[in-house]
Amino acid sequence: MLLLDLANPTRFLTLVQRALPWLIGATAVAFTAGLYLAANAPDDYQQGATVKIMFVHVPAAWLAMGIWTLMSIAALGTLVWRHPLADVAAKAAVPVGAAFTLICLVTGMLWGRPMWGAYWVWDARLTSVLILFLMYLGLIALWRTVDDPSRAGRAAAILTLVGAINLPIIKFSVDWWNTLHQPASVLRLAGPAIHPTILIPLLIMAFAFALLFVTLHLAAMRNEILRRRVRTLMLMQAQAAPGSAA
Amino acid sequence: MNPLAALFMRDLKLAGRVGGGAGIGVLFFLIVIMLTPFAIGPDLALLARIGPAILWLGALLASLLTLDRLIAADAEDGSLDLILTGQTPLELAVATKALAHWLSTGLPLVIATPLFALLMNLDTQASLAVALTLLAGTPALTFIGLLGAALSVTLRRGGLLLTVLVLPLTVPVLIFGVSASNAAIVGPLPFGTPFTILCALTLVSFVVGTFAAAAALRHGIE
């Protein structure tokens, strides 16, 4: 019933105001611990110090896909359940998701230059993540083109759901096509194939990234609700102004 | 007359008359093909190697060119409101419109392909292979474009946004279209594998594009 309670924007705002300082603190603690452990993690015997790029690259990639999944659920919330905050959640997530996808692409390119000998190869996973990034940008363009927020929300929801078809393609591209990008080594049936000295800092970094996303997302949702209130107030003021049509 | 048949005949007639723009797509296709040798030089061996890819790119861009009129023209003259309020299911109506649009803009591209393939130094077998993959793949482009057209119909700056929204979704069609053409020309993959996936993509985009476009129209107009 929590979701129903949160349908009231005012109640949601008070909850966010109370939770945000704690979330910011928790994010800072998690990042301190994660970065300390990552800095002290042993170098890979083949890759040397470049393996440390992974501590940023992998959590960003997980979030890039996770945020689109979240947006798809929010899209269902908009179209099916008509939850009043679903399109706010979807809109607030788009720029954050685009930023994490860009971080994933840039760190991957920086790692690829010394390891593969090129910043970019047209590998199935790299290409599908690039398409994901372009779809994030397309969604931003769609949100910015439509001036009525509820209409923009429904158009964006449909595009989000159609774009969700890309997610399984990204996840399984390294298994379906024999690519240069290595296959999954953390989330797999036979257990992680990474040594605990690297796996534990990676998981803590992933936790820190997830906290960062939740913090940014809630703050962006709060800003969007306030922005819509300002817009409504300004519309009412314009209508009440002398000489206006209504 | 069946309302769907009436809609189909009307769209075909409109496409053939002044302002329909069906021929412009083929002309644009020819220009893209003609620009390529200017960009990369008249190396016939190289042209033959990248010919299928250039033909596919040209067809993809040409099919985008006419998309913004697919639904926007109906929204302007009010016939979209009649379609929306009519008894016929909206999914069937937009599917009919997409089919008429493909017949008037997609099919001419396919027919022109063997002719334009001569400019790319492709032999008969290769040009027929490209035409066959385009025949199987261009409907997918139309159905994906149908969704973009439906999403952007109510927007002021719809045309440019339509391109940005549609192009990333067409990447799988392009990949399998070109790899099927190359498989038929040089191998070593069997032609059947990528070609079957291309046909599957067309069928999937028929279902997804039609239903999503109908949903976008229902939510966008009020």
Image (cartoon, grey):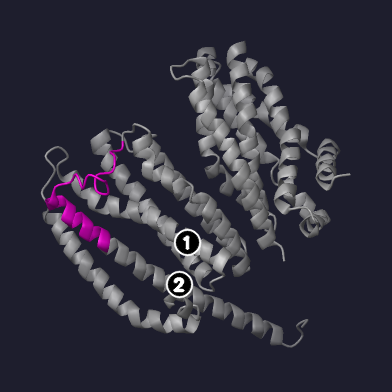
Question: Which residue is painted at 39% across and 82% down in the image?
Answer: A15
Residue carrying label 2: A221
Dot 2: what SS?
helix
Left or right side of A237 for B21: right
Of A134 and A84, which appears nearest the observer? A84
Dot 1: what SS?
helix
Residue carrying label 1: A73
Identify the subunit bearing mark 2.
A
Q: Is residue A68 above or below residue A14?
A: above
The Cα–Cα distance between marks 2 and 1, rounded to whole angstroms, is: 16 Å
* Amino acid on which the number 1 mark rests in the picture: Ile
Left or right side of A32 for B57: right
Q: Which residues fall within the magenta stretch?
A: A181-207
| Residue A185 on the magenta segment | yes
Of A235 and A66, which appears nearest the observer? A66
Q: Is residue A107 above or below residue B175?
A: below
Question: Which residue is painted at 65% across and 57% down in the image?
Answer: B216
Give residue B60's position: percent from left, percent from top: 61, 34
- Crowding at dot 1, Cα within 10 Å, few <14 / some 14-19 / many 20+, comes out as some
